Image: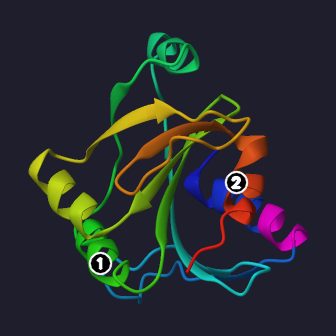
Amino acid sequence: MTEKDWSKKLTKKLEDRHFFVQRIESGSTGRGIPDMFVVTPYLCPLWIENKIISLDKNVIKRLEAGDTCQVKIPWREGQLVWHSMVSKSVPCFTITKIAGTKYVLLTMMNYLFGLRNDMIHNYATVKRLDTESYYGLCENDTIFIREDMLIDFITSRKFS
């Protein structure tokens, strides 16, 4: 699956749940601008950057077991800066599909996350989310979650 395929699949899932989705991807947009602008059914705006990565099976097993791991996410130049500036007023996420699995990584972007990750070369500390209560996600976190729970998670949060 390519990043473009993942973006189309996510777009369909969001639209099926009554999200407004505007795909932004094009060569003519400014550097760092995310792939999608989304408005939830609760009329909350979000910016979403899509990524796709491959992970070693041992890392996936560790995440499934609840371990915390360092994972490199391939942000391009300018993306972390853009997210860190815009997230002061509008929630921003990076959704990273793990190729060949049923999992995604969801990163809540904010100003401190962008600064911290510029300094540590795009590595994110990933932890598994308690999928029963969605307990455990904070700003600056990257969580490991099943793809089929992603839209429910985003929908369950009332962003202000």
Of 77 and 95, which appears nearest the observer?
95
Quarter of the figure with residue 39: bottom right
Q: Which residue is mark 2?
A: 153
User: Does residue 22 sit above or below 93 in this rendering?
Assistant: below
The circle on residue 82 is 1
Looking at the image, residue 26 lies above or below residue 125: below
Quarter the C terminus occupies:
bottom right
| Mark closest to the chain's N terminus, 2 or 1 | 1
Residue located 71% across and 87% down the image: 43
Q: Amino acid at mark 2?
A: Phe
Which residue does the image show at 50% across and 81% down from the upper left?
Answer: 26
Extent of the magenta region: 12-17
Q: Secondary structure at mark 1?
A: helix
> Can you say which quadrant of the picture contains the N terminus?
top right
User: In terms of secondary structure, where does tag 2 sit?
Assistant: helix
Q: Residue at x 66, y 72 (%)?
A: 158
Residue at screen point 64% across, 83% down: 44
Mark 2 is surrounded, within 10 Å at the Cα level, by few (under 14), some (14 to 19) or many (20 or more) other residues, namely: few
Residue type highlighted by circle 1 = Trp
Image side of residue 8 versus residue 80, left or right: right
Q: How many marks?
A: 2
